[in-house]
Image (cartoon, grey):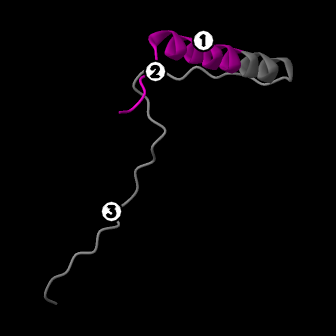
Amino acid sequence: MAARRSSSKKAAAAVETRESLENQVNAFLKSGGEIEQIARGVSGQVWTSSRQITIGKK
């Protein structure tokens, strides 16, 4: 039988992750980095022409 994690262990991991991210962001900002706010719904995905091969008679 697989061991189950208690919810307190999950909560502790989430708190640790949040604190780690917060420390990284603070270090980034202190080193002169800037955070750019992107409008909601904007994607970083770049759409290009289709790369699918179309097979047909010539």
The local secondary structure at tag 3 comes to loop
Q: Which residue is mark 3?
A: 50
- Describe the element under mark 1 as helix, strand or loop: helix
Q: As rendered, which of 27 and 42 lies closer to the eye?
A: 27
Which residue is outermost to the left?
57
Magenta segment boundaries in residue numbering: 1-22
Q: CB under 8 Å between callouts 2 and 1?
A: no
Left or right of 13? Residue 47 is: left
- Label of residue 1 in the image: none
| The image quarter in which residue 20 lies | top right
First in sequence, mark 2 or 3: give its number. 2
**Neighbourhood count class around disc 2 (C-alpha, 10 Å): few under 14, some 14–19, many 20 upward:** few
x, y (%) of residue 43? 44, 34
Nearer to us of marks 1 and 3 is: 1
Q: Residue furthest bottom?
A: 58
Residue beneath the point at 45% across and 12% down: 7
Left or right of 42 on screen, residue 17:
right
Q: Nearer the viewer, residue 3 or 26?
A: 3
Direction front: furthest residue: 1
The x and y percentages for residue 25 are: 72, 20
Foreground disc of the pair 2, 1: 2
Q: Which residue is mark 1?
A: 15
- Mark 1 near mark 3, Cβ–Cβ under 8 Å? no
Sooner in the amino-acid sequence: mark 2 or mark 1: 2
Q: Label 1: few (<14), some or many (≥20) within 10 Å?
A: few
The residue carrying mark 2 is: 5
Q: Nearer the viewer, residue 21 or 47?
A: 21
Residue kind at label 3, given as amino acid type: Ser
Residue type at mark 1 is Val
Inter-mark Cα distance, 2 to 1: 16 Å
Q: Secondary structure at mark 2?
A: loop
In the image, farthest residue toward the right: 31
